[in-house]
Amino acid sequence: MTGSVSATLILPDRTAGGVLEWDGDRITAVRTTTAHTSKYIAPGFVDLHVHGGDGADFMDLSAEAYRTVCRCHARHGTTSLTPTSTVGTRDQYRRFLELCGELRDAVTGGARILGGHLYGPYFHPPAKGCHPNADFLTPQLEQDDELLAFAGRGLTTLTVAPETPGTERLVKAARDRGLLVTAGHTFATFPQMEEAVRWGVRHVDHLFCAMSDRARLRQQQAYPMRAGVMEATLYHDELTTEVIADGWHLSAELLKLAYKVKGPDRLALVSDAMRAVDLPDGEYWFGATGGGERVRRKGEVGVTLDATGLASGVMGMDHGVRTFHRLTGAPLHEVVRMASLTPARILGLDAEIGSLEVGKRADFVILDEALNVEQVYVGGVRIV
């Protein structure tokens, strides 16, 4: 199938009027002109951190649940994603990774699955946030190797808490298998994060959320005040990170700080969305139906039942792009880069996806003047 579309192109370094052409699943031409239009062609968004949508959660552990989530997020401009688990049981972790492998690069009717993000087993339990109380795993050789055996199939990304004993061996083994290793749901100190960087940790999950900082660590030691994961993330150039830009998780000043310090090439936008995306306010399961944690959708964010804490996102990536652009004033091409090329590069897939370039997959989104999604193409096929 061949095709072409004309509008304002959102390129990695600028916007420009132009024409995008494709043949089959590949972009064959990107021609710029001087004529801007009221509509945009953006590269498809790449979501590194997403749990569910439209009533389904990846921890429901069925192929139909996976397809439901992928269709939901495609409506919001996401053309590729890494299914992200919650804290569960050992059997659930294995089945999650099996399904990620079975559906990787398969036709879902929505976003393409890039491989699974194993998120939960290796958390520091006191930093679990809204995740269920289930099997928190301490790194152990036989158990770890059973999960790492999914690398290259259903497993793409592994999150760890660096302060947990045995994590050094786990990180090094995961890196040897080509995995992206991230730090998340951790109360590690700055020196522990320095060690983690030496081991091979290269990314930090949802900056400012479920992590240690000077104020938290001061509760255990009054002086001298110490730095934690937040400060280490901002300090270490080796670390990329991500923000939930729904306008509720983080204020405008925190988004501006992250953008200023990390820049658009080391900061990604993520949805961190649960099953309540595109559904009304009310109570929902975060994690497996009947076995996860009950949380509430309240407007444009998820909260705990007592409304005292945040509990995942409920908005798509398009909302994050609009919100980040509005709250920070960052140039549109840089905001879109943080939702497309930067996460693709973090995953090591920027040669295939993430920007409008000849030879890359024909994954793109047509946006109106207000950056609302009008059309979505995955591999040159219109799905929205």
Image (cartoon, helix red, strand yellow):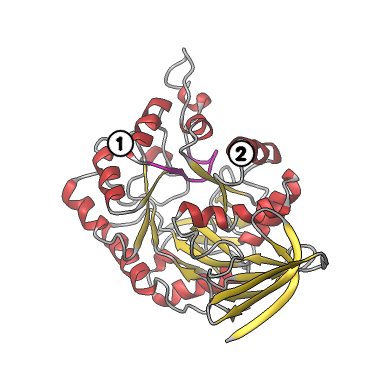
Q: Say which element carries label 1.
A: loop
Residue furthest bottom in the image: 1
Please tell me in which quadrant of the rendered image residue 382 appears.
bottom right
**Residue at image location 38% in from the left, 41% down from the top:** 201
Q: Position of residue 21 (x, y in %)?
A: 64, 77
Residue furthest top in the image: 223
Q: Earlier in the sequence, mark 2 or mark 1?
A: 1
Q: Position of residue 35 (x, y in %)?
A: 83, 67
Residue with the mark numbered 1: 164
The span picked out in magenta is: 201-210
Residue with the mark numbered 2: 258
**Residue at image location 23% in from the left, 51% down from the top:** 144
Magenta stretch, main secondary structure class: loop
Numbered circles on residues, count: 2
Which amino acid type is shown beneath numbered disc 1? Thr
Reply above or below: 83 against 75: above
Can residue 191 be spotted in the picture?
A: yes
Q: Residues within 10 Å of mark 1 (few under 14, many from 20)?
A: some
Please tell me in which quadrant of the rendered image residue 43 appears.
bottom right
